[in-house]
Image (cartoon, rainbow, N blue to C red):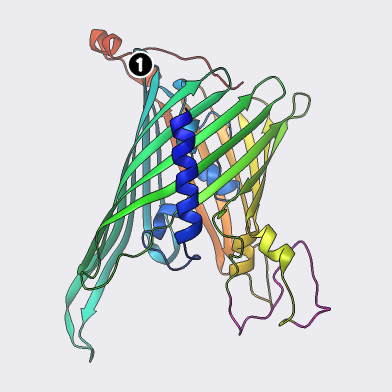
Amino acid sequence: MKIFWLALLSLLHGVACAQVNGGEHIFEFLRLSQSPHITAIGGISVANPSKDIMLSTANPALLRPEFHTHLGLNYNIYYAGTRVSNLFYAHHSKQIQTTFGLGIQYLDYGSFKVTDNIGNELGAGKAADYAISISASRSYLDRWRYGATLKYAGSHLIQNKSAAMLVDFGVMYADTNSQWYAGAVVKNAGIQLNKYDMNSGSQPLPIDVQIGIVKKFKKAPFSLSVLAHHLYAWDIRYDNPADQVDNSLLFNDNTQDTKKKSYFADKLFRHFVFALDINLGKRLELSAGYNHLRRSELAIAEKKGLSGFSFGGGLYLNKFIIHFAQSYYHISGAYSEVGINFALNQLFGMGKGGNKINWSEKFANQYK
């Protein structure tokens, strides 16, 4: 555990010294939520203790024995017709007390016409991004879990290709008595293996540092979450001289000259995501989130609408979990996402072979 913390601190120092702001990275698709539940609570989750295996894609420390043989799937149409597919499967090894996960992320951007510099058509080309991940998580003492995810990411943009190896490191703390949960994760740290253009230098990867806390209430059917992201840099505002407008939901200060403003509150809240989960009995869960960075970057002065807000719901059945979410990036429309989780060991039998690999094992929920 000490080695893990030393490695994490060294990585944080490197991030703080070397990173640039958003919009200048390759493999930006790795920032996208892979779960409707995560989408519903603002796009980021590092400490949510819900019984949803797809939350493990946000922080490998959330991968727990209770997810043994669970499979999460979702397929959605993103903006501009982009087809998005996500898969994650978990398996727990009792012998080494480790829970493993296998994930696949795929984005298909479709076909494009290829032309020369004067418009002559040269044929057609396809564009796609994908990532294959392997995760592992273990418990430490009574309240801690730690985990890591190794990812191979590839990109094929018509005639150009690129690849990278990346890793996520995460920890989680769960106090089930007082119902406090906390997590931290370093995401997408790694190296670029192949460049889009071999004559240019390496492009920066979309690394991020996130922390979060979740508070559940024993006598109230809801939980509150506060998440912080992009912690490697203080100022992540997009400096656009042509956009001197206030898109803030939380404050409105037009008393100073825009050139003299410090924008302290805006800079601070761009790092935060606020979320709410409401449990209506044991089967139904409603979720909502607010992402201030998303609203600040994508809302327009004339009509801000629900930019930055997201909503969703989950139906928890014995053998299935179904989640739906809508996220409002822009007034042009919301992005809808649907996902389903299966408890495979409750759906299928594998006979004696299943017993040998713990296929039929059921694990108690550690975070009730």
Nearer to me, 29 or 306: 29
Image quarter where the C terminus lies is: top right
Image-quadrant location for residue 67? top left
Tell me how many marks there are. 1
- 79 within the magenta span: no
User: Which residue is located at x 49 percent, y 65 percent?
Assistant: 22
Where is residue 328 shown, x and y percent of the image? 59, 60
Secondary structure found at label 1: loop
Q: Is residue 366 left or right of residue 32?
A: right
Nearer to me, 47 or 70: 47
The prevailing secondary structure element of the residues shown in magenta is loop
Where is residue 135 shown, x and y percent of the image? 37, 34
- 253 within the magenta span: yes
Where is residue 347 shown, x and y percent of the image? 37, 20
Where is residue 178 shown, x and y percent of the image? 72, 23
254 over 72 or under it: above or below = below
User: Which residue is located at x 58 percent, y 76 percent?
Assistant: 239
- Magenta region: which residues? 239-257
352 over 98 or under it: above or below = above
Inspect this view and state whether residue 324 appears. no
Q: Is residue 365 left or right of residue 351?
A: right
Q: Which residue is the extreme one toward the bottom?
A: 118
Q: Which residue is mark 1?
A: 96
